[in-house]
Image (cartoon, grey):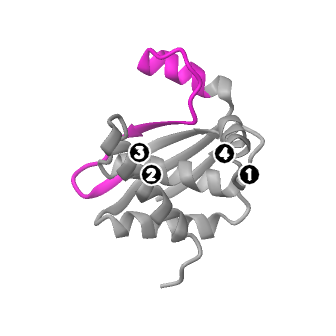
Amino acid sequence: MIDFHFKSDLLINNKSEYVDWIARIIESEGFVAGQIDYIFCTDEYLLQLNQEYLDHDTFTDIITFDYTDGKTISGDIFISTDRVKENAKEFKVDILNELRRVMSHGLLHLAGYGDKGVEEAKLMREKEEEKIKMFHVEL
């Protein structure tokens, strides 16, 4: 099941379109969906999680807690909508495009993709772009 929780001012009105898109991303990577919770929150909320669970004292756009078991993707994906808005301005992209980039980024982490090294980060960016393009694709 794919659920959305809002702890910031961002709301997704067309949830069914996002659920369908997320399910197609998961399937495209050879997985099935377990319990996936997206929590949209503020910078302060995510900073507190970053400090408490990862010992990082920095703002970030996303933190993913992975509960994947075999080919069943499950996890909690916390997204700072403040960072998404700032990143959209900084990179001169539409806010929804940036939101989808970060949402797909979390799923890709759950599917086993990393982003720490140069090559990993390059592949992650390519995969994000591929998944963003899937948003309105009909099967």
Q: Which residues are magenta?
A: 46-73
Residue linked to disc 4: 91
Circle 3 Cα neighbour tier, 10 Å, few/some/many (<14 / 14–19 / ≥20):
many
Residue type, mark 4 in image = Phe
Q: Is residue 47 magenta?
A: yes
Question: Is disc 3 in contact with disc 1, using a CB cutoff of under 8 Å?
Answer: no
**Marks 1 and 4, the one that precedes in the sequence:** 1
Q: Position of residue 95 (x, y in %)?
A: 71, 52
Residue in the foreground of this view, choosing between 60 and 8: 60
**Marks 3 and 2, the one that precedes in the sequence:** 3
Residue type, mark 1 in image = Leu
Residue in the picture at 46% in, 47% down: 106
Residue linked to disc 1: 11
Residue type, mark 2 in image = Arg
Q: CA distance from mark 4 to mark 2?
A: 14 Å
**Marks 1 and 2, the one that precedes in the sequence:** 1
Residue 74 can be seen in this image: no
Look at the numbered disc 4 and give the secondary structure of its residue: helix
- Nearer the camera: disc 3 or disc 2: 2
Describe residue 134's horizontal placement relative to residue 88 as left or right.
Answer: left
Residue linked to disc 2: 125
